[in-house]
Protein backbone atom coordinates (compact mmCIF):
# COMPACT_ATOMS: atom_id res chain seq x y z
CA UNK A 1 0.00 0.00 0.00
CA UNK A 2 1.39 3.41 -0.88
CA UNK A 3 3.00 5.47 1.84
CA UNK A 4 3.66 2.56 4.21
CA UNK A 5 7.14 1.09 4.52
CA UNK A 6 7.59 -2.68 4.52
CA UNK A 7 11.38 -2.74 4.77
CA UNK A 8 11.77 -0.24 7.60
CA UNK A 9 12.68 3.42 7.66
CA UNK A 10 15.98 4.33 9.31
CA UNK A 11 14.72 7.88 9.98
CA UNK A 12 11.54 6.69 11.69
CA UNK A 13 11.32 6.88 15.46
CA UNK A 14 8.12 4.82 15.43
CA UNK A 15 6.74 2.42 12.85
CA UNK A 16 3.37 0.72 13.20
CA UNK A 17 3.09 -2.19 10.77
CA UNK A 18 -0.22 -3.90 9.97
CA UNK A 19 -1.38 -3.78 13.59
CA UNK A 20 -4.65 -5.38 14.58
CA UNK A 21 -6.35 -4.82 17.94
CA UNK A 22 -9.25 -6.62 19.55
CA UNK A 23 -11.15 -6.12 22.79
CA UNK A 24 -12.27 -9.09 24.88
CA UNK A 25 -10.82 -11.34 22.18
CA UNK A 26 -13.74 -10.58 19.87
CA UNK A 27 -14.42 -6.94 18.96
CA UNK A 28 -12.01 -5.84 16.24
CA UNK A 29 -11.03 -2.22 16.83
CA UNK A 30 -8.04 -1.91 14.43
CA UNK A 31 -7.37 -3.85 11.23
CA UNK A 32 -4.03 -3.72 9.44
CA UNK A 33 -3.13 -0.22 10.61
CA UNK A 34 0.29 1.08 9.56
CA UNK A 35 1.86 4.47 10.19
CA UNK A 36 5.29 6.05 10.47
CA UNK A 37 6.50 8.81 12.79
CA UNK A 38 9.82 10.30 11.63
CA UNK A 39 12.10 11.67 14.32
CA UNK A 40 11.39 15.25 15.32
CA UNK A 41 7.94 15.51 13.70
CA UNK A 42 4.31 15.96 14.69
CA UNK A 43 1.99 13.35 13.16
CA UNK A 44 -1.77 13.84 13.44
CA UNK A 45 -4.32 11.03 13.66
CA UNK A 46 -7.81 12.13 12.64
CA UNK A 47 -11.17 10.42 12.36
CA UNK A 48 -14.71 10.28 13.70
CA UNK A 49 -15.75 8.92 17.08
CA UNK A 50 -15.18 5.18 17.22
CA UNK A 51 -12.64 5.19 14.37
CA UNK A 52 -9.92 3.67 16.56
CA UNK A 53 -7.73 6.70 17.29
CA UNK A 54 -7.47 6.24 21.07
CA UNK A 55 -7.04 2.49 20.58
CA UNK A 56 -4.02 3.18 18.37
CA UNK A 57 -2.43 5.33 21.08
CA UNK A 58 -3.09 2.64 23.70
CA UNK A 59 -1.43 0.04 21.48
CA UNK A 60 1.67 2.22 21.15
CA UNK A 61 1.83 3.07 24.88
CA UNK A 62 1.22 -0.50 26.05
CA UNK A 63 -1.95 0.41 27.98
CA UNK A 64 -4.38 -1.73 25.95
CA UNK A 65 -4.58 -4.53 28.58
CA UNK A 66 -5.86 -1.98 31.10
CA UNK A 67 -8.91 -1.58 28.84
CA UNK A 68 -9.37 -5.27 28.09
CA UNK A 69 -7.69 -4.99 24.70
CA UNK A 70 -4.75 -6.65 22.96
CA UNK A 71 -2.61 -5.92 19.91
CA UNK A 72 -2.73 -9.38 18.38
CA UNK A 73 -1.37 -8.70 14.88
CA UNK A 74 1.53 -6.81 13.31
CA UNK A 75 4.51 -4.98 14.75
CA UNK A 76 5.08 -1.74 16.68
CA UNK A 77 8.71 -0.76 16.19
CA UNK A 78 10.20 1.96 18.39
CA UNK A 79 13.79 2.80 17.50
CA UNK A 80 13.86 -0.48 15.59
CA UNK A 81 12.70 -2.66 18.52
CA UNK A 82 9.30 -4.40 18.50
CA UNK A 83 7.38 -3.18 21.58
CA UNK A 84 3.97 -4.62 20.64
CA UNK A 85 3.89 -6.80 23.75
CA UNK A 86 5.55 -4.28 26.07
CA UNK A 87 3.63 -2.98 29.06
CA UNK A 88 3.15 0.69 29.97
CA UNK A 89 6.13 0.78 32.35
CA UNK A 90 8.45 -0.60 29.69
CA UNK A 91 7.07 1.87 27.14
CA UNK A 92 7.78 4.79 29.49
CA UNK A 93 11.33 3.54 30.10
CA UNK A 94 11.80 3.35 26.32
CA UNK A 95 10.73 7.00 26.00
CA UNK A 96 6.99 6.84 25.15
CA UNK A 97 4.50 8.76 27.31
CA UNK A 98 0.78 9.15 26.69
CA UNK A 99 -1.44 12.01 27.88
CA UNK A 100 -4.92 10.43 27.86
CA UNK A 101 -8.13 12.22 26.98
CA UNK A 102 -9.86 13.96 29.87
CA UNK A 103 -6.98 15.60 31.79
CA UNK A 104 -6.48 12.78 34.29
CA UNK A 105 -4.44 14.61 36.87
CA UNK A 106 -4.30 13.82 40.59
CA UNK A 107 -6.77 16.39 41.88
CA UNK A 108 -5.89 16.20 45.58
CA UNK A 109 -2.16 16.53 44.93
CA UNK A 110 -0.47 19.88 44.35
CA UNK A 111 0.93 20.91 41.00
CA UNK A 112 4.46 20.11 42.24
CA UNK A 113 3.39 16.69 43.51
CA UNK A 114 1.75 15.88 40.17
CA UNK A 115 4.97 16.80 38.37
CA UNK A 116 7.06 14.69 40.73
CA UNK A 117 4.73 11.76 40.01
CA UNK A 118 5.56 12.15 36.33
CA UNK A 119 9.28 11.87 37.11
CA UNK A 120 9.08 8.67 39.17
CA UNK A 121 11.05 6.70 36.56
CA UNK A 122 13.82 9.34 36.38
CA UNK A 123 16.70 8.52 38.73
CA UNK A 124 18.91 11.52 37.97
CA UNK A 125 18.21 14.58 40.12
CA UNK A 126 19.78 16.75 37.42
CA UNK A 127 17.39 15.31 34.83
CA UNK A 128 14.40 15.97 37.11
CA UNK A 129 15.50 19.59 37.61
CA UNK A 130 16.03 20.00 33.87
CA UNK A 131 12.57 18.61 33.11
CA UNK A 132 10.95 20.77 35.80
CA UNK A 133 12.61 23.90 34.41
CA UNK A 134 11.36 22.99 30.96
CA UNK A 135 7.77 22.54 32.17
CA UNK A 136 7.74 25.84 34.05
CA UNK A 137 9.24 27.62 31.05
CA UNK A 138 6.43 26.25 28.86
CA UNK A 139 3.72 26.86 31.48
CA UNK A 140 4.63 29.82 33.74
CA UNK A 141 1.18 29.60 35.38
CA UNK A 142 2.06 26.19 36.78
CA UNK A 143 5.11 27.64 38.50
CA UNK A 144 2.96 30.39 40.03
CA UNK A 145 0.51 27.77 41.33
CA UNK A 146 2.95 24.98 42.08
CA UNK A 147 1.70 24.60 45.67
CA UNK A 148 -1.98 24.71 44.74
CA UNK A 149 -4.10 21.53 44.60
CA UNK A 150 -4.65 20.46 41.01
CA UNK A 151 -8.42 20.16 41.43
CA UNK A 152 -8.57 23.96 41.88
CA UNK A 153 -7.00 24.65 38.48
CA UNK A 154 -9.10 25.64 35.46
CA UNK A 155 -9.67 23.10 32.68
CA UNK A 156 -6.95 24.66 30.54
CA UNK A 157 -4.49 24.72 33.44
CA UNK A 158 -5.25 21.06 34.20
CA UNK A 159 -4.50 20.20 30.57
CA UNK A 160 -1.20 22.08 30.86
CA UNK A 161 -0.43 20.11 34.02
CA UNK A 162 -1.24 16.79 32.32
CA UNK A 163 1.15 17.63 29.48
CA UNK A 164 3.77 18.95 31.91
CA UNK A 165 3.59 15.78 34.00
CA UNK A 166 4.20 13.71 30.85
CA UNK A 167 7.24 15.85 29.97
CA UNK A 168 8.84 15.19 33.37
CA UNK A 169 10.19 11.86 32.13
CA UNK A 170 11.77 13.62 29.10
CA UNK A 171 10.02 11.40 26.53
CA UNK A 172 11.26 10.89 23.00
CA UNK A 173 7.66 10.39 21.81
CA UNK A 174 4.66 12.19 23.32
CA UNK A 175 1.19 10.76 22.60
CA UNK A 176 -1.58 13.36 23.01
CA UNK A 177 -5.23 12.25 23.03
CA UNK A 178 -7.66 15.14 22.36
CA UNK A 179 -5.69 17.86 24.20
CA UNK A 180 -8.11 20.60 23.08
CA UNK A 181 -11.28 18.81 24.23
CA UNK A 182 -13.65 21.11 26.10
CA UNK A 183 -11.27 24.08 26.24
CA UNK A 184 -11.98 27.73 25.41
CA UNK A 185 -10.69 28.94 22.02
CA UNK A 186 -7.90 31.07 23.51
CA UNK A 187 -6.69 28.10 25.54
CA UNK A 188 -6.83 25.83 22.47
CA UNK A 189 -4.55 28.30 20.67
CA UNK A 190 -2.07 28.20 23.56
CA UNK A 191 -2.12 24.38 23.68
CA UNK A 192 -1.37 24.31 19.94
CA UNK A 193 1.54 26.70 20.44
CA UNK A 194 2.89 24.56 23.27
CA UNK A 195 2.74 21.38 21.17
CA UNK A 196 4.78 23.14 18.49
CA UNK A 197 7.28 24.36 21.10
CA UNK A 198 7.63 20.86 22.56
CA UNK A 199 8.30 19.50 19.10
CA UNK A 200 10.84 22.24 18.32
CA UNK A 201 12.68 21.24 21.50
CA UNK A 202 13.20 17.75 20.02
CA UNK A 203 10.22 15.67 21.19
CA UNK A 204 8.25 13.82 18.51
CA UNK A 205 4.47 13.98 18.87
CA UNK A 206 1.52 11.81 17.81
CA UNK A 207 -1.57 14.01 18.08
CA UNK A 208 -5.11 12.60 18.13
CA UNK A 209 -7.58 15.46 17.65
CA UNK A 210 -11.19 16.18 16.70
CA UNK A 211 -10.07 19.74 15.97
CA UNK A 212 -8.68 18.93 12.53
CA UNK A 213 -7.83 22.54 11.69
CA UNK A 214 -5.58 22.81 14.73
CA UNK A 215 -4.01 19.39 14.18
CA UNK A 216 -3.29 19.93 10.48
CA UNK A 217 -1.82 23.36 11.19
CA UNK A 218 0.91 22.02 13.50
CA UNK A 219 1.49 18.55 12.02
CA UNK A 220 3.81 17.58 9.18
CA UNK A 221 1.75 14.55 8.16
CA UNK A 222 -1.57 12.96 9.09
CA UNK A 223 -3.51 9.71 8.97
CA UNK A 224 -7.31 9.51 8.79
CA UNK A 225 -8.83 6.44 10.44
CA UNK A 226 -12.23 5.09 9.53
CA UNK A 227 -13.80 2.08 11.24
CA UNK A 228 -10.43 0.85 12.49
CA UNK A 229 -8.53 1.21 9.21
CA UNK A 230 -6.35 3.88 7.61
CA UNK A 231 -8.55 5.51 4.96
CA UNK A 232 -6.26 8.41 3.98
CA UNK A 233 -2.73 9.55 4.70
CA UNK A 234 -0.36 12.19 3.42
CA UNK A 235 1.18 15.52 4.34
CA UNK A 236 -0.91 17.88 6.45
CA UNK A 237 -1.00 20.33 3.54
CA UNK A 238 -2.37 17.67 1.19
CA UNK A 239 -5.04 16.55 3.60
CA UNK A 240 -6.15 20.07 4.54
CA UNK A 241 -7.05 20.65 0.87
CA UNK A 242 -8.39 17.16 0.19
CA UNK A 243 -12.02 16.89 -0.93
CA UNK A 244 -12.12 13.40 0.65
CA UNK A 245 -11.15 14.83 4.04
CA UNK A 246 -13.70 17.61 3.66
CA UNK A 247 -16.37 15.00 2.94
CA UNK A 248 -15.40 12.98 6.01
CA UNK A 249 -15.34 16.03 8.30
CA UNK A 250 -18.27 17.92 6.80
CA UNK A 251 -20.70 15.10 6.03
CA UNK A 252 -21.96 13.30 2.97
CA UNK A 253 -22.34 9.76 4.34
CA UNK A 254 -24.64 7.39 2.47
CA UNK A 255 -25.73 5.60 5.65
CA UNK A 256 -26.88 8.80 7.35
CA UNK A 257 -28.57 9.96 4.16
CA UNK A 258 -30.63 6.76 4.35
CA UNK A 259 -31.46 7.57 7.97
CA UNK A 260 -32.54 11.07 7.01
CA UNK A 261 -34.84 9.65 4.35
CA UNK A 262 -36.33 7.26 6.88
CA UNK A 263 -36.88 10.11 9.32
CA UNK A 264 -38.98 11.94 6.73
CA UNK A 265 -41.25 8.92 6.21
CA UNK A 266 -44.73 9.65 7.65
CA UNK A 267 -45.77 7.35 10.51
CA UNK A 268 -48.75 6.92 12.77
CA UNK A 269 -47.35 9.02 15.58
CA UNK A 270 -48.69 9.23 19.15
CA UNK A 271 -47.85 12.95 19.13
CA UNK A 272 -45.90 15.04 21.59
CA UNK A 273 -47.46 15.95 24.90
CA UNK A 274 -47.35 19.67 24.14
CA UNK A 275 -46.91 21.98 21.20
CA UNK A 276 -43.35 22.70 20.20
CA UNK A 277 -42.55 26.42 19.97
CA UNK A 278 -39.71 28.34 18.35
CA UNK A 279 -36.55 28.57 20.49
CA UNK A 280 -34.75 31.83 19.69
CA UNK A 281 -31.43 33.25 20.89
CA UNK A 282 -30.49 36.86 20.23
CA UNK A 283 -26.98 38.28 20.68
CA UNK A 284 -25.83 35.74 23.28
CA UNK A 285 -22.50 36.55 24.91
CA UNK A 286 -20.98 34.59 27.80
CA UNK A 287 -17.81 35.63 29.61
CA UNK A 288 -15.96 33.86 32.39
CA UNK A 289 -13.65 36.43 33.94
CA UNK A 290 -11.49 37.60 31.06
CA UNK A 291 -12.42 34.66 28.79
CA UNK A 292 -15.18 35.10 26.20
CA UNK A 293 -16.80 31.70 25.57
CA UNK A 294 -19.43 32.88 23.05
CA UNK A 295 -19.97 36.33 21.57
CA UNK A 296 -23.05 37.80 19.86
CA UNK A 297 -24.52 34.42 18.85
CA UNK A 298 -28.05 34.39 17.40
CA UNK A 299 -30.16 31.56 15.96
CA UNK A 300 -33.70 30.18 15.80
CA UNK A 301 -34.70 26.54 16.28
CA UNK A 302 -37.93 26.19 14.33
CA UNK A 303 -40.66 23.93 15.78
CA UNK A 304 -40.40 20.27 14.85
CA UNK A 305 -36.94 20.54 13.24
CA UNK A 306 -33.50 19.06 13.92
CA UNK A 307 -31.11 21.97 14.47
CA UNK A 308 -27.42 21.10 14.83
CA UNK A 309 -24.54 23.07 16.33
CA UNK A 310 -21.10 22.16 15.07
CA UNK A 311 -17.60 23.55 15.45
CA UNK A 312 -14.13 22.58 16.65
CA UNK A 313 -13.37 21.87 20.31
CA UNK A 314 -13.76 25.04 22.37
CA UNK A 315 -16.02 26.72 19.79
CA UNK A 316 -18.77 27.37 22.38
CA UNK A 317 -21.28 24.61 21.57
CA UNK A 318 -21.75 23.19 25.07
CA UNK A 319 -21.73 26.72 26.53
CA UNK A 320 -24.67 27.52 24.24
CA UNK A 321 -26.59 24.47 25.49
CA UNK A 322 -25.84 25.49 29.07
CA UNK A 323 -27.39 28.90 28.42
CA UNK A 324 -30.48 27.36 26.82
CA UNK A 325 -31.04 25.14 29.87
CA UNK A 326 -30.37 27.82 32.51
CA UNK A 327 -27.06 26.43 33.77
CA UNK A 328 -25.22 29.56 32.63
CA UNK A 329 -26.64 33.08 32.62
CA UNK A 330 -25.51 35.06 29.57
CA UNK A 331 -23.51 38.23 30.05
CA UNK A 332 -25.52 39.77 27.23
CA UNK A 333 -28.42 38.73 25.01
CA UNK A 334 -31.73 36.90 25.44
CA UNK A 335 -33.34 33.52 24.83
CA UNK A 336 -37.05 33.11 24.12
CA UNK A 337 -39.15 29.96 23.98
CA UNK A 338 -42.22 31.12 22.14
CA UNK A 339 -42.99 34.50 23.68
CA UNK A 340 -41.38 33.73 27.04
CA UNK A 341 -37.84 34.75 28.00
CA UNK A 342 -35.77 31.99 29.61
CA UNK A 343 -33.21 34.38 31.10
CA UNK A 344 -33.25 34.21 34.89
CA UNK A 345 -35.19 30.93 35.04
CA UNK A 346 -33.60 28.08 36.98
CA UNK A 347 -32.96 24.80 35.11
CA UNK A 348 -35.94 22.97 36.64
CA UNK A 349 -38.28 25.79 35.59
CA UNK A 350 -36.99 25.58 32.02
CA UNK A 351 -37.52 21.80 32.14
CA UNK A 352 -41.13 22.41 33.22
CA UNK A 353 -41.65 24.39 30.01
CA UNK A 354 -40.78 21.25 28.04
CA UNK A 355 -37.04 21.63 27.35
CA UNK A 356 -35.11 18.46 28.21
CA UNK A 357 -31.45 17.54 27.78
CA UNK A 358 -28.95 14.69 27.64
CA UNK A 359 -25.25 15.10 28.46
CA UNK A 360 -22.05 14.01 26.73
CA UNK A 361 -21.08 11.85 29.72
CA UNK A 362 -23.57 9.23 30.85
CA UNK A 363 -25.56 10.26 33.93
CA UNK A 364 -27.56 7.09 34.54
CA UNK A 365 -27.82 4.99 37.70
CA UNK A 366 -25.77 1.91 36.73
CA UNK A 367 -27.12 -0.38 39.46
CA UNK A 368 -30.80 0.42 38.75
CA UNK A 369 -32.80 -1.26 36.01
CA UNK A 370 -33.51 0.41 32.70
CA UNK A 371 -37.18 0.70 33.73
CA UNK A 372 -36.30 2.44 37.00
CA UNK A 373 -34.00 4.87 35.17
CA UNK A 374 -36.80 5.70 32.74
CA UNK A 375 -39.32 6.11 35.54
CA UNK A 376 -36.92 8.62 37.09
CA UNK A 377 -37.24 10.61 33.87
CA UNK A 378 -40.98 10.92 34.59
CA UNK A 379 -40.46 12.25 38.10
CA UNK A 380 -41.44 15.78 37.08
CA UNK A 381 -44.81 14.46 35.84
CA UNK A 382 -45.52 12.41 38.97
CA UNK A 383 -48.22 13.71 41.34
CA UNK A 384 -47.87 11.23 44.21
CA UNK A 385 -45.82 12.54 47.09
CA UNK A 386 -42.81 10.86 48.68
CA UNK A 387 -44.84 9.50 51.62
CA UNK A 388 -47.74 8.05 49.61
CA UNK A 389 -45.33 6.46 47.13
CA UNK A 390 -43.21 5.03 49.95
CA UNK A 391 -46.27 3.57 51.69
CA UNK A 392 -47.59 2.14 48.44
CA UNK A 393 -51.01 3.78 48.74
CA UNK A 394 -53.57 2.84 46.04
CA UNK A 395 -53.37 6.19 44.22
CA UNK A 396 -49.57 5.96 44.08
CA UNK A 397 -49.73 2.38 42.79
CA UNK A 398 -52.18 3.36 40.06
CA UNK A 399 -50.00 6.28 39.04
CA UNK A 400 -46.87 4.11 38.88
CA UNK A 401 -48.73 1.61 36.68
CA UNK A 402 -49.74 4.45 34.35
CA UNK A 403 -46.18 5.76 34.29
CA UNK A 404 -44.86 2.26 33.53
CA UNK A 405 -47.13 2.08 30.48
CA UNK A 406 -45.62 5.29 29.11
CA UNK A 407 -42.11 4.06 29.90
CA UNK A 408 -42.77 0.89 27.89
CA UNK A 409 -44.01 2.99 24.96
CA UNK A 410 -40.80 5.05 24.96
CA UNK A 411 -38.68 1.89 25.34
CA UNK A 412 -40.49 0.40 22.35
CA UNK A 413 -39.80 3.47 20.25
CA UNK A 414 -36.05 3.11 20.95
CA UNK A 415 -36.00 -0.71 20.74
CA UNK A 416 -35.19 -1.13 24.42
CA UNK A 417 -38.12 -3.34 25.55
CA UNK A 418 -35.98 -6.44 26.01
CA UNK A 419 -33.66 -4.52 28.34
CA UNK A 420 -36.26 -2.98 30.67
CA UNK A 421 -35.54 -5.31 33.57
CA UNK A 422 -31.76 -5.40 33.17
CA UNK A 423 -29.38 -3.25 35.20
CA UNK A 424 -27.87 -0.42 33.18
CA UNK A 425 -24.37 -1.63 34.11
CA UNK A 426 -25.03 -4.85 32.15
CA UNK A 427 -25.73 -3.04 28.88
CA UNK A 428 -23.36 -2.16 26.07
CA UNK A 429 -22.23 1.45 25.77
CA UNK A 430 -24.45 2.08 22.75
CA UNK A 431 -27.52 0.74 24.54
CA UNK A 432 -26.76 2.86 27.61
CA UNK A 433 -26.63 5.98 25.42
CA UNK A 434 -30.07 5.09 24.01
CA UNK A 435 -31.36 4.58 27.56
CA UNK A 436 -30.25 8.12 28.37
CA UNK A 437 -32.10 9.38 25.29
CA UNK A 438 -35.18 7.40 26.37
CA UNK A 439 -35.03 8.85 29.89
CA UNK A 440 -35.02 12.39 28.47
CA UNK A 441 -38.03 11.49 26.31
CA UNK A 442 -39.90 10.16 29.33
CA UNK A 443 -40.19 13.77 30.54
CA UNK A 444 -42.35 14.39 27.44
CA UNK A 445 -40.33 17.34 26.16
CA UNK A 446 -41.29 19.60 23.29
CA UNK A 447 -37.60 20.47 22.73
CA UNK A 448 -34.83 17.90 23.25
CA UNK A 449 -31.19 19.01 23.54
CA UNK A 450 -28.63 16.29 22.75
CA UNK A 451 -24.98 16.90 23.71
CA UNK A 452 -22.72 14.61 21.65
CA UNK A 453 -25.12 11.61 21.57
CA UNK A 454 -22.69 9.38 19.62
CA UNK A 455 -19.43 10.35 21.39
CA UNK A 456 -17.35 7.21 21.86
CA UNK A 457 -19.61 4.98 19.74
CA UNK A 458 -18.48 2.63 17.00
CA UNK A 459 -20.00 2.88 13.51
CA UNK A 460 -22.75 0.33 14.15
CA UNK A 461 -23.84 2.04 17.37
CA UNK A 462 -23.75 5.43 15.64
CA UNK A 463 -26.05 4.23 12.85
CA UNK A 464 -28.47 2.79 15.41
CA UNK A 465 -28.54 6.05 17.35
CA UNK A 466 -29.11 7.99 14.13
CA UNK A 467 -32.11 5.79 13.40
CA UNK A 468 -33.40 6.26 16.95
CA UNK A 469 -33.22 10.07 16.69
CA UNK A 470 -34.85 9.95 13.25
CA UNK A 471 -37.69 7.86 14.70
CA UNK A 472 -38.12 10.24 17.63
CA UNK A 473 -38.32 13.22 15.33
CA UNK A 474 -40.84 11.64 12.93
CA UNK A 475 -43.07 9.98 15.52
CA UNK A 476 -43.17 12.62 18.26
CA UNK A 477 -42.77 15.76 16.17
CA UNK A 478 -40.56 17.45 18.76
CA UNK A 479 -37.74 19.89 18.11
CA UNK A 480 -34.23 18.47 18.49
CA UNK A 481 -31.11 20.53 19.15
CA UNK A 482 -28.01 18.51 18.40
CA UNK A 483 -24.35 19.14 19.33
CA UNK A 484 -22.03 16.59 17.73
CA UNK A 485 -18.54 16.17 16.23
CA UNK A 486 -19.51 13.36 13.82
CA UNK A 487 -20.27 15.37 10.69
CA UNK A 488 -21.75 12.52 8.65
CA UNK A 489 -24.16 11.90 11.52
CA UNK A 490 -25.08 15.61 11.73
CA UNK A 491 -25.47 16.21 8.01
CA UNK A 492 -27.72 13.16 7.61
CA UNK A 493 -30.15 14.28 10.32
CA UNK A 494 -30.18 18.08 10.55
CA UNK A 495 -32.60 20.46 8.83
CA UNK A 496 -30.44 23.43 9.76
CA UNK A 497 -26.87 23.79 11.00
CA UNK A 498 -25.30 26.62 13.00
CA UNK A 499 -21.49 26.67 12.94
CA UNK A 500 -19.50 28.18 15.82
CA UNK A 501 -15.79 28.93 15.81
CA UNK A 502 -13.89 30.78 18.55
CA UNK A 503 -17.23 31.54 20.20
CA UNK A 504 -18.76 33.33 17.20
CA UNK A 505 -21.31 32.19 14.62
CA UNK A 506 -19.56 31.83 11.27
CA UNK A 507 -22.33 30.10 9.30
CA UNK A 508 -26.01 29.17 9.54
CA UNK A 509 -27.99 27.32 6.90
CA UNK A 510 -28.95 23.98 5.42
CA UNK A 511 -26.44 21.10 5.61
CA UNK A 512 -25.59 21.56 1.93
CA UNK A 513 -24.98 25.30 2.35
CA UNK A 514 -22.83 24.81 5.44
CA UNK A 515 -20.82 21.93 3.99
CA UNK A 516 -19.67 24.09 1.08
CA UNK A 517 -19.11 27.32 3.02
CA UNK A 518 -15.43 28.40 2.73
CA UNK A 519 -15.45 29.74 6.31
CA UNK A 520 -16.61 26.35 7.61
CA UNK A 521 -13.99 24.48 5.60
CA UNK A 522 -11.36 26.86 6.96
CA UNK A 523 -12.58 26.35 10.55
CA UNK A 524 -12.44 22.58 10.28
CA UNK A 525 -9.51 22.07 7.92
CA UNK A 526 -7.77 25.49 7.94
CA UNK A 527 -4.53 25.35 6.00
CA UNK A 528 -2.67 27.71 8.39
CA UNK A 529 1.03 27.40 7.63
CA UNK A 530 0.40 24.85 4.87
CA UNK A 531 -0.20 26.92 1.76
CA UNK A 532 2.09 25.16 -0.70
CA UNK A 533 0.41 24.94 -4.09
CA UNK A 534 2.30 22.09 -5.70
CA UNK A 535 1.52 19.11 -3.46
CA UNK A 536 0.45 15.65 -4.66
CA UNK A 537 -2.98 14.36 -3.67
CA UNK A 538 -3.24 12.38 -0.44
CA UNK A 539 -3.02 8.63 -0.78
CA UNK A 540 -6.11 6.54 -0.12
CA UNK A 541 -6.09 2.91 0.90
CA UNK A 542 -9.55 2.61 -0.63
CA UNK A 543 -8.23 3.64 -4.03
CA UNK A 544 -5.20 1.38 -3.71
CA UNK A 545 -7.33 -1.59 -2.77
Image (cartoon, helix red, strand yellow):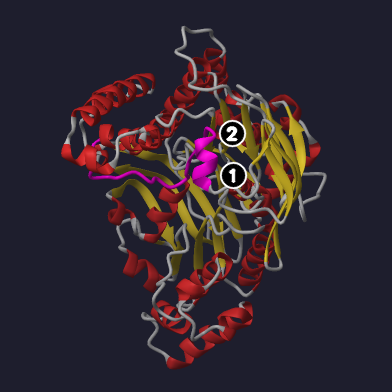
Q: Is residue 414 shown above or below 536? A: above
How far is the residue under mark 2 from the one under mark 1?
Answer: 9 Å
Determine whether 105 is above or below 295 in the image.
below
Q: What residue is shown at x 51% (from left), y 21% (from top)?
A: 470
Range covered by the magenta-colored residues: 347-369
Picture coordinates of residue 209, whole percent (x, y)? 57, 51
Picture residue at 64% right of the left edge, 45% below the top: 234
Count the marks: how many? 2
How many C-alpha atoms fall within 10 Å of the one at disc 1: few (<14), some, or many (≥20)? many
The x, y position of residue 113, in whole percent, is 42, 83
Q: Which mark is residue 404?
A: none
Q: Is residue 515 above or below residue 346?
A: above
Nearer the observer, 275 or 1 = 275
Report if residue 434 lies within the magenta region. no
Q: Nearer the viewer, residue 155 or 17?
A: 155
The picture quadrant where one finds residue 264 is: top right
Say which label, 2 or 1, has the lower sequence index.
Answer: 1
Left or right for 498, reference 145: right
Q: Position of residue 421 (x, y in %)?
A: 20, 30
- In the picture provided, is 283 more to the left or to the right than 68? right
* Magenta run includes residue 365: yes
* Residue 522 appears in the rendering: no
Whether label 2 touches label 1, CB < 8 Å: yes
Q: In the rendered image, which residue does mark 1 sit on?
A: 321
Density class for disc 2 (Cα within 10 Å; few <14, some 14-19, many ≥20) is many
Disc assigned to residue 481: 2
* Residue at 57%, 85% in the rendered image: 143
Asked which secondary structure carries label 2, the reply is strand
Amino acid sequence: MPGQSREGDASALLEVRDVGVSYAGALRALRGVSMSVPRGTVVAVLGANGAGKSTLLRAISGTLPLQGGAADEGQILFEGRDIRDAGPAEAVRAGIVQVPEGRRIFGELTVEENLRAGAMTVRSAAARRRASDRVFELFPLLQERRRQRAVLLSGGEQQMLAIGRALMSEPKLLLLDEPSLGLAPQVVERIAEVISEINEQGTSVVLVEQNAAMALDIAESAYVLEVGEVALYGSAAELSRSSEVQERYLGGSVSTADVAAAADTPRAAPGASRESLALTAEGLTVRFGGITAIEDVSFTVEPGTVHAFIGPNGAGKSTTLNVLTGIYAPTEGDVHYGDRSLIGLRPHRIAELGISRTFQNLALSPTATVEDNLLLGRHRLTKAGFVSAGLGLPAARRERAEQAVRVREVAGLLELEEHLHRRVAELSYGNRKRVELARALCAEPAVLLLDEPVAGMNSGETERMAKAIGDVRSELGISIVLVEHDMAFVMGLADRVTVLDFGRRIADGSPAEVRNDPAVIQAYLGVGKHDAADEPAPESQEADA
